[in-house]
Image (spheres, rainbow, N blue to C red):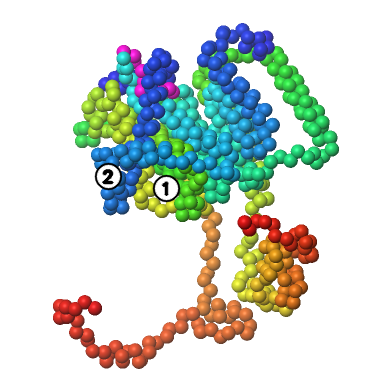
């Protein structure tokens, strides 16, 4: 059965052999997938947020309101296209285009499924793959910053510029955390190609529990849990989604970098945001959640990871991650800018570096003898313990007593009562409480409303 | 056998590579020329981005996918973005002024530029003369990324670490120079502030705002005291109080 598994996994040699029409079909499929994901994603987000806010959400256009986004998009296309007088016309036009191109291009290295047969051709369900496919994804996301920043700058007004400046700092900062968390995946998988990473997550080890052979998932979300958590936080910052949607914080910056945009250009920005969200979910699925591989209970069926079925598992995982995106937006308030940057640089980055160091240490002692390995682990743990114990902490100054506080006041100050002065209760209040008659408040005795 | 002869002896350039090259090479040149010619600083930076992107694709074409992607991620994505960040903070209307501040600046720049190009060219020529090119098959034998990693962490590890130490020193130095954090002891507490405020010779009330009872709201326009004198305290110290000319006191026509 293991041989069957391996036969489904495309290798790098399987790419670049398709006829031109097959390449065209794949590209169009990836593009249409991005567009459809936007159409349905907006509807999905509004419905889910509506459900969380105990209201129906869009439910009028089409069944379950499915066509609401289409109607909105058509309406948006017929709006007036406003070009501000102080705008930089060429850059103003290109900014949304850059955003969309970067978001859609990233879809080209996502593996949607294993080797399938299309019109008699054995081909992987992926537009293309290169030895540095994950770096292509990183490049796309780092170029996507240009769309936001240039859009903000070219609008020629203050709020968009502030939004653009914020986003350039924000996206670069979170890209660092994102890139570092992928390093752990590279170290474990030993490859940078997306199909290779998916294949590396398929090597499940068998756990024997009570006579049943349960394959322990080789998903990196479990093996590399810290990397997974940091990566997901970083992609929320990278896609400018709540609670990190500072470039378009409507309570501070009107709409941030898209304040001056209208009509189709605004629609392009919206499109790029949702495509980026779906793309990033797909990247997370590929890198950490086993890609198109079926989760455990389904793998008991031997045909789960062959043919066209894996595409379904892949879309299921992507949908679950998009739901988490929406869930975050429906739950968390927006961070303040300085909190956000501090979180990125002072929390995510150091944790990431320490985790990579630990992982590298674990991997380098993997092949040692068990006694040496135990010794190395003990030394590492001892050093960590010592560092924790001897870490120079900011010693809290002893709190001055009341008498010291009084003595330290400058000469000639107004005489103050001591801070811990106990004022006895007034005897008069006691008497008033005692003399008050109990009020007669029997229910229903008085029908008149006051 | 020199590098050029090896490249010439290599088999024919594939069609896809040739097409990509002939599309991107003019674009790269256009970006380079536009970077020099653009008046607006941001446009200039964007042209440079175009050139760098084309260069990244060229590296990929030359069987160096890792260096190509790193070029796009690091140079285009991060460094040029920081450039843009600074340019935007400076302001969008700051175009290059074409006035020469140093006499003979252009001639000196051209001569120095040519000299530098000559130095780099001759240095490269002498360094590469007599070098046997191993060829791409041998260089990428165990994979492009693995090959670079092996060289970087064995033969060139000292240079690599030295460079990173230099960069960290520069970053820490910039932070130390730019970031001024006052210590807790240096801060005046409320009592000290009040004593300084009410000490003899200091007027405890708020300063009059500039331009009060005046015809202009500029910071350089001093406030007028009730007896008609100009208050020196209302303008910043670097701006001396002076009489306004008639031209300055007339309305600017901005109240349409």
Left or right for A322, reference B102: left
Compute the Cα span from label 2 to label 1: 24 Å
Quarter-of-image position of residue B51:
top right
Camera-side residue: B111 or A92? A92
Q: Residue A242 carries which label?
A: 1
Query: What's drawn in magenta, residue-wise?
Result: A120-129
Question: Can you tell which of label 2 and label 1 is closer to the viewer?
Answer: 2
State the residue at coordinates (35%, 27%). Answer: A112
* Sequence-wise first label, 2 or 1: 2
Q: Which mark is residue B190?
A: none
State the residue at coordinates (68%, 36%). Answer: B39
Camera-side residue: A425 or A261? A261
Quarter-of-image position of residue A234:
top left
Query: How far across and down, in percent of the image, does residue B110 sit?
Result: 79, 29
Left or right for B105, reference A100: right
Judged from the image, the secondary structure of the residue bearing numbered disc 2 is loop
Camera-side residue: A319 or A165? A165
Q: Mark 2 points at which residue?
A: A59
Q: Is residue B212 shown in magenta?
A: no
Q: Is residue A124 shown in magenta?
A: yes
Marked residue chain, label 2 = A
**In this rendering, does residue B67 appear at all?**
no
**Dividing the image into 4 quarters, which one contains the C terminus of chain B?**
bottom right
Query: How far across and down, in percent of the image, does residue A261 sit?
Result: 49, 43
Marked residue chain, label 1 = A
Q: Which residue lies furthest to the right in this view?
A: B103
Left or right for B157, reference A261: right
Q: How crowded is mark 1: few (under 14 residues within 10 Å), some or many (20 or more)?
A: many
State the residue at coordinates (40%, 20%). Answer: A24
């Amino acid at each position: 059965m293991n041989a069957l598994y391996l036969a489904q996994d495309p290798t790098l040699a399987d790419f670049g052999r398709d006829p031109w029409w097959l390449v065209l079909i794949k590209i169009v499929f990836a593009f249409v997938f991005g567009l459809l994901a936007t159409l349905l994603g907006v509807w999905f987000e509004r419905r889910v947020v509506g459900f969380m806010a105990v209201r129906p959400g869009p439910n009028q256009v089409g069944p379950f309101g499915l066509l609401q986004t289409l109607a909105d998009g058509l309406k948006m296309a017929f709006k007036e296209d406003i070009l501000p007088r102080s705008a930089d016309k060429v850059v103003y036009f290109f900014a949304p285009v850059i955003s969309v191109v970067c978001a859609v291009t990233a879809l080209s290295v996502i593996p949607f499924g294993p080797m399938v047969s299309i019109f008699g051709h054995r081909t992987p369900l992926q537009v293309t793959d290169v030895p540095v496919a994950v770096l292509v994804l990183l490049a796309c996301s780092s170029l996507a910053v240009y769309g936001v920043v240039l859009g903000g700058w070219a609008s020629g007004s203050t709020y968009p510029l502030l939004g653009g400046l914020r986003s350039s700092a924000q996206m670069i900062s979170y890209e660092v955390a994102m890139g570092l968390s992928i390093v752990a995946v590279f170290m474990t998988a030993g490859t940078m190609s997306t199909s290779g990473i998916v294949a590396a997550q398929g090597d499940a080890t068998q756990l024997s529990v009570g006579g049943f052979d349960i394959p322990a998932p080789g998903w990196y979300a479990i093996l590399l849990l810290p990397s997974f958590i940091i990566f997901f936080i970083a992609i929320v910052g990278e896609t400018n989604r709540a609670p990190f949607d500072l470039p378009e914080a409507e309570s501070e910056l009107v709409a941030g970098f898209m304040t001056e945009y209208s009509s189709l250009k605004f629609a392009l920005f919206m499109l790029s945001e949702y495509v980026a969200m779906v793309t990033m979910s797909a990247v997370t699925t590929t890198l950490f959640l086993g890609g198109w591989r079926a989760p455990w209970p389904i793998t008991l069926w031997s045909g789960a990871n062959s043919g066209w079925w894996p595409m379904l598992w892949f879309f299921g995982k992507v949908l679950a991650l998009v739901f988490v995106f929406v869930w975050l937006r429906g739950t968390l308030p927006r961070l303040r800018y300085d909190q956000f940057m501090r979180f990125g640089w002072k929390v995510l980055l150091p944790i990431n570096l320490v985790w990579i160091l630990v992982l590298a240490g674990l991997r380098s002692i993997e092949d040692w003898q068990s006694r040496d390995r135990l010794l190395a682990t003990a030394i590492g743990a001892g050093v960590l313990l010592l560092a924790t114990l001897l870490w120079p902490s900011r010693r809290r100054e002893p709190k001055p007593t009341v008498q010291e506080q009084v003595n330290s006041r400058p000469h000639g100050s107004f005489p103050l009562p001591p801070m811990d002065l106990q004022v006895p209760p007034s005897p008069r209040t006691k008497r008033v409480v005692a003399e008050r008659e109990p009020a007669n408040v029997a229910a229903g005795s008085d029908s008149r409303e006051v | 056998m020199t590098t050029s002869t090896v490249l010439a002896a290599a088999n024919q350039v594939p069609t896809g590579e040739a097409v990509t090259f002939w599309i991107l090479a003019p674009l790269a040149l256009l970006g380079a020329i536009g970077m020099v010619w653009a008046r607006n600083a941001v446009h200039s930076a964007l042209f440079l981005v175009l050139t760098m992107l084309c260069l990244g694709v060229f590296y990929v074409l030359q069987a160096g996918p890792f260096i190509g992607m790193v070029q796009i991620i690091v140079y285009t994505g991060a460094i040029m973005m920081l450039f843009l960040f600074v340019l935007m903070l400076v302001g969008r209307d700051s175009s290059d002024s074409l006035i020469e501040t140093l006499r003979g600046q252009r001639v000196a720049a051209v001569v120095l530029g040519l000299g530098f190009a000559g130095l780099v060219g001759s240095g490269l020529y002498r360094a590469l003369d007599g070098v046997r090119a191993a060829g791409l098959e041998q260089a990428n034998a165990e994979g492009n990324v693995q090959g670079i990693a092996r060289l970087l962490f064995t033969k060139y590890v000292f240079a690599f670490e030295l460079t990173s130490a230099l960069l960290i020193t520069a970053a820490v130095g910039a932070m130390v120079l730019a970031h001024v954090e006052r210590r807790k002891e240096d801060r005046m507490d409320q009592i000290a502030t009040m004593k300084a405020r009410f000490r003899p010779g200091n007027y405890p009330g708020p300063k009059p705002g500039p331009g009060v009872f005046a015809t202009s709201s500029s910071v350089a326009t001093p406030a007028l005291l009730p007896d008609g004198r100009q208050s020196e305290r209302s303008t910043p110290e670097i701006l001396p109080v002076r009489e306004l000319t008639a031209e300055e006191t007339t309305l600017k026509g901005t109240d349409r």
